[in-house]
Amino acid sequence: MNRLMIFQRSRCRHQGQQGFSTLAIAFVLLALTIPIVLIAESTLVAGRQATSNALGQESLRAIDSSMSEVMGEIRLDEGAVNIGCQGTPPSASWVFPRSQTRPKQGPLNIEIRCSPEPGSVSQTGRVLDLEAYVDEGTGWKRRGEARVKYIDMLGASPEPGVEMLVCDWQLGADAGALAPC
């Protein structure tokens, strides 16, 4: 019986401290893991958002470039004077297809649709509305527009596109009404 009492006494002495270090380590790991997980998650979200923004900007730059290119083409078209958008064949309204290659996303099909502002076409100048449409796979969506005024006379002599005034220029899905020239 004496041995049994010694065994019980030694067991009682250590019973209150067993597992304390394991619990302490578990709480320290928990306290360190939660901030690490939160920081890693916020880094991933920020990276995805930055990538999405960059790809969206790449598309807007392609649309912007296409509209600028078409504006220059219309400006110097002698046949478009007193007609509107296109001189050969003569047409007041016209669709200019522009395919752009985006480095990170591949090709982008863009149409720049040109139409004269009603009553604005004469020998001296014209006001044209340009609308950029993008083929997004589910149909054509408007992603930009501009209103441009061309002066086609230099003094008394005809000079196509001698002056060009961009009255309004809007890019993106939220493009609103164009400002008058």
Image: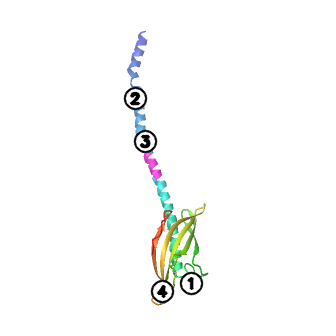
SS state under label 2:
helix
Image location of residue 136, percent across then percent down: 58, 62
Crowding at mark 1 (Cα within 10 Å: few <14, some 14-19, many 20+):
some
Instruction: Compare marks 4 and 3 and give the one earlier in the sequence.
Output: 3
- Tell me the chief SS of the magenta region: helix
The residue located at (43%, 41%) in the rendering is 34
Q: Tell me which residue sits at (56%, 84%) in the image.
A: 79
> Which numbered disc flags the more N-terminal residue, 2 or 3?
2
Q: Is residue 106 above or below residue 92?
A: above
Question: Residue 153: which numbered mark, if any?
Answer: 4
Residue 139 in the figure: left or right of residue 13: right
Disc 2 versus disc 3: nearer the observer: 3
Q: Nearer the viewer's eye, disc 1 or disc 2?
A: 1
- Tell me if mark 3 has few (under 14), some (14-19) or many (20+) residues whose alpha carbon lies within 10 angstroms of its own: few
For the image, the number of numbered tags is 4
First reached walking from the N terminus: tag 4 or tag 1 = 1
Of the two numbered discs 4 and 2 in the rendering, the one whose residue sits closer to the viewer: 4
Q: Earlier in the sequence, mark 4 or mark 2?
A: 2
Amino acid type, label 2: Phe
Q: CA distance from mark 4 to mark 1?
A: 14 Å
Residue where numbered disc 3 is placed: 34
Q: What residue is pinned by disc 1? A: 79
Q: Are marks 1 and 2 in contact (CB under 8 Å)?
A: no
Q: Position of residue 97 (x, y in %)?
A: 59, 72
Q: Secondary structure at mark 3?
A: helix
Which of the two discs, 3 and 1, labels the residue nearer the N terminus? 3
Which residues, given as a range, are shown in magenta? 38-45
Residue receiving disc 2: 20
Q: CA distance from mark 4 to mark 3?
A: 71 Å
Label 1 sits on what residue type?
Gly
Residue 44 shown in magenta: yes
